[in-house]
């Protein structure tokens, strides 16, 4: 999943009763990409993490979620917000299993619907999550004009469509992977 992660983070953010400000909301959006950031760090370090084993498996996501949730707890002193960060990181994994496939536990099988092989399905799935997240923050008492603007929604849908066009192109991979280079 690509921009759909933002929709999930927005959905989780919209459930926060303690009103979260712009900065925290942006941090929550950023946290939704944590496993991908870890993947890119492996690539930069030249470490092969096959099918996200060290970034997208359940043990890896728990470590990432606990680390980020822990930082959120230290910064905000709110368990509710810390749990929101944990949830956003953990939800990255099932979201990615809709669009691709992943190894959930070391030694386990590859699981996932692999919508990336059908970019139109991928676009529909991601657009549905993006729109749901956007509508959720409209309804929630979150006063962030930029986040609820139509421009942001349209921009995200265009960016997602562009990614799906790239995915549809032959042999193009959005995320670099040290395994392939090896
Ligand atoms: Zn991912």
Image: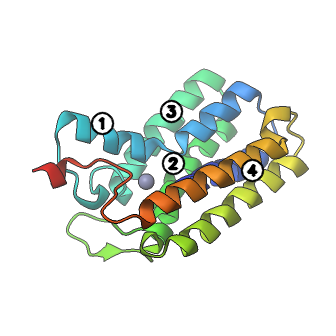
Disc sitting over residue 89 in the figure? 2
Q: Please say if 96 is above or below 43.
A: below
Q: Which residue is mark 4?
A: 154
Structural crowding at the residue carrying mark 4, measured as other residues with C-alpha within 10 Å and reported as few (<14), some (14–19) or many (≥20): few
Q: Position of residue 65 (x, y in %)?
A: 47, 44
Q: Which residue is mark 3?
A: 70
Q: Secondary structure at mark 2?
A: helix
Choose the circle earlier in sequence order: 1 or 4.
1
Q: Secondary structure at mark 1?
A: helix
Q: Secondary structure at mark 4?
A: helix
Q: Position of residue 74 (x, y in %)?
A: 56, 24
Q: Please say if 100 is above or below 22.
A: below
Q: Nearer the viewer, mark 4 or mark 2?
A: 4
Q: Residue at x 83, y 55 (%)?
A: 135
Choose the circle earlier in sequence order: 2 or 1.
1
Q: Which residue is mark 1?
A: 41
Q: Nearer the viewer, mark 2 or mark 1?
A: 1
């Amino acid at each position: 999943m690509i921009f759909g992660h933002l929709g999930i983070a927005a959905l989780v953010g919209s459930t926060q009763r303690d009103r979260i400000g712009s900065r925290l909301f942006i941090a929550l959006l950023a946290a939704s990409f944590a496993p991908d950031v870890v993947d890119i760090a492996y690539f930069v370090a030249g470490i092969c993490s096959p099918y996200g084993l060290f970034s997208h498996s359940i043990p890896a996501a728990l470590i990432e979620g606990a680390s980020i949730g822990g930082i959120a707890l230290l910064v905000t002193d709110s368990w509710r917000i810390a749990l929101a960060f944990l949830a956003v990181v953990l939800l990255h994994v099932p979201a990615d299993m809709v669009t691709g496939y992943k190894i959930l536990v070391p030694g386990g099988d590859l699981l996932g619907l692999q919508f990336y092989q059908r970019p139109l399905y991928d676009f529909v799935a991601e657009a549905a999550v993006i729109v749901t997240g956007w509508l959720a923050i409209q309804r929630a008492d979150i006063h962030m004009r930029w986040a609820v603007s139509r421009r942001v929604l349209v921009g995200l849908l265009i960016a997602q469509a562009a990614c799906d066009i790239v995915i549809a192109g032959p042999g193009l991979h959005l995320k670099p992977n040290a395994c392939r280079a090896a």
